[in-house]
Amino acid sequence: MGKLVLISLVIAALSALLGERILNLRKRTLASRELVRNHLPNCVTLKHLSHGSEDITVVRDGLAFISTGLKYPGLPGSDVPGKIYSVDLQDPRMKPVELRMPRNFDLDIFNPHGISAYIDTNDDEIYLFVVNHPQHKSQVEVFRFVEDDHSLVHLNTIKHELLYSLNDIVAVGVDSFYATNDHYFSHEIFKAVVEPLLFQPWSNVVYYSPKDVKIVSEGYYMANGINMSPDKRHIYVADVLDHNVHLLERKEDNTLAPVKSVALGSLCDNIEVDPETGDLWLGCHPNGWKMFVSDPNDPPGSEVIRIQKIHSDEPVVTQVYADDGQVIMGSSVATTYGGKLLIGTVFHKALVCDLK
């Protein structure tokens, strides 16, 4: 009898703990938030990107690179192989062009996530860094962009024990970068079930170069998007489950010193930086719970947030676009060029709108 009572008490305690953890997870994912639409004029869907446009980065003269076809555990996906597209944002047609991949690169395992472009000032070459998840592992592919024939030349595959759960990346040289690990564990079960329930700030940022690889910032609940200020002196990191962006100062040894964080009120994903104004543009998930429930009758919405004057004492945080999932689902990135706003998603389409 005593043993049965003990077992009952243990089961009750575990049930109570599990219930508390689930409630906490719902709170962190803003499960109760209902979004009010805030649309922009003249929005059109970009062609060929119906399987997601998880990350977008813009370089010189309005040339944009887009990753598509991400397969991420727990989220909708497709069997379509991952691809990289380019878009000329100066062209009124804004037609995405699939970049030709080299024959020596295995497209069957190409599962692109975050991307970053680096322009070598010595020869003006563009290098594209792509987080890749073959068999849901993590590695970085480095390509050189050949503009004349819209192709990529594969230069290197980077693997390291500290690059174990990569999400996003920002290149700071032809062979160096900062990257976010969005989880502590690398095993999918622990990442998908155990870690969200424990909910500890175990995520981090890693610096990589051929001679030096190290964790340079940690204490994030889920480090996600990462980017760099136009003067290259600061790094920005989005903590998607803590609803904020961290501002960090780069040191001579490439470590990062925390400066401050800015509250956003949304689960913000990737970060793009306006090279002229320094404004941050973020694609956000207004209700992260809906992303994982995947109810077609109640789809996940999309939100674009802009941060102005982030280095000042009073940063300005503005919602620029919001949709309840009827137009665009699961926004993960936003960037601007020439009075246009380009919005990408984890698994849905890409949208381009006129800014007011």
Image (cartoon, rainbow, N blue to C red):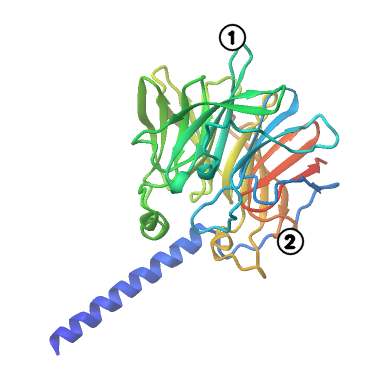
Determine the residue located farthest toward the top in the rendered image: 122
Kind of residue at badge 2: Gln
> Between tags 2 and 1, which lies in front?
1
Residue annotated with mark 1: 122
* Above or below for 170 versus 192: above
The percent coordinates of residue 267 (x first, y second) are 56, 51
The percent coordinates of residue 259 (x first, y second) are 47, 31
* Left or right for 269, reference 8: right
| Label 2 Cα crowd, 10 Å radius (few <14 / some 14-19 / many 20+) | few
Q: Nearer the viewer, residue 47 or 44?
A: 47
Image point 65% across, 45% down: which residue? 53
Determine the residue located farthest toward the left in the rendered image: 2
* Above or below for 214 versus 265: above
Residue 65 image-quadrant placement: top right
Residue annotated with mark 2: 326
Kind of residue at badge 1: Asn
The percent coordinates of residue 275 (x first, y second) are 67, 25
Name the element at disc 2.
loop
The percent coordinates of residue 126 (x first, y second) are 62, 21
Name the element at disc 1.
loop
User: Could one spot residue 261 in this view of the protein?
Assistant: no
